[in-house]
Every structure is written in structure tokens, then in C-alpha cells.
Image (cartoon, grey):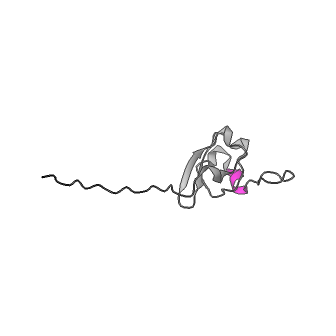
Amino acid sequence: MSRSNWKTPFIDKSLLKRLIPQHEKKPIWSRRSTIYPAAVGLKLQIYNGKDMISRKIKPEMVGHKLGEFVTTRKNFIAKTKKVIPTKKK
């Protein structure tokens, strides 16, 4: 569900300060904040629960949440068994 129409899009106060290019390199822990048009072109470090992941904000991202572009889980990769070659006589 999206946020109610009568409410404005949410943006964390600490994120507002980082929209200035001088504060661009500081990390952001607010994954729930909405991306504003003023942030387009900035490279932000977003927290995924373990590490800080760098993402460049593109015009297509405006209106979405920061957390949508940083995955919090690893992809499962099934291990394959090694085939041991048998000796032929």
C-alpha cells in the first residue's frame, strides 16, 4: 500500500541535510525515506543491515523509497557436487 494522498511524502530530517553535495559522502540509515527530485544525481551510501552500499540516484527512482534499491538478503546459490573421475583399466 502507498502512503495516503493527504500526507506528504516522508523524508528523514537527517537526509534533508545530505541533499547538499558537500554532505553527500556521509552514510544514510533511513531506508524508509522517499527519494525527492533534489537528490537526482547524488551518490548516496545506504545501509542494508550489514554494509553501506553506494547508489547513484537516477530520475527513475524519484518517488520510491531508498530501501527498494539496496537488497538486504543474499541470493541463494546452490552448491554443485564435485564429480570425481574414476580410473579406467
* Residue at image point 55% right, 52% down: 53
Residue 21: image quadrant is top right
* Residue at image point 25% right, 56% down: 84
Range drawn in magenta: 12-17
Q: Is residue 72 above or below residue 23?
A: below
58 or 87: nearer the viewer: 87
- Count of numbered circles in the view: 0
Q: Is residue 16 above or below residue 38?
A: below
Q: Position of residue 80 (x, y in %)?
A: 37, 55
Please tell me whether the stretch drawn in magenta is mainly helix, strand or loop. Answer: helix
Q: Position of residue 29 (x, y in %)?
A: 63, 58
Residue 58: image quadrant is top right
51 or 14: nearer the viewer: 51
Q: Is residue 85 left or right of residue 26?
A: left
Q: Quadrant of the N terminus?
A: bottom right
Furthest residue toward right: 6
87 or 14: nearer the viewer: 87
Residue 35 appears in the figure? yes
Magenta run includes residue 86: no
Q: Position of residue 78 (x, y in %)?
A: 43, 56
Furthest residue toward front: 89
84 or 20: nearer the viewer: 84
Furthest residue toward bottom: 49
Magenta run includes residue 16: yes
Q: Position of residue 8 (x, y in %)?
A: 82, 51
Residue 48: image quadrant is bottom right
Residue 26 appears in the figure? no
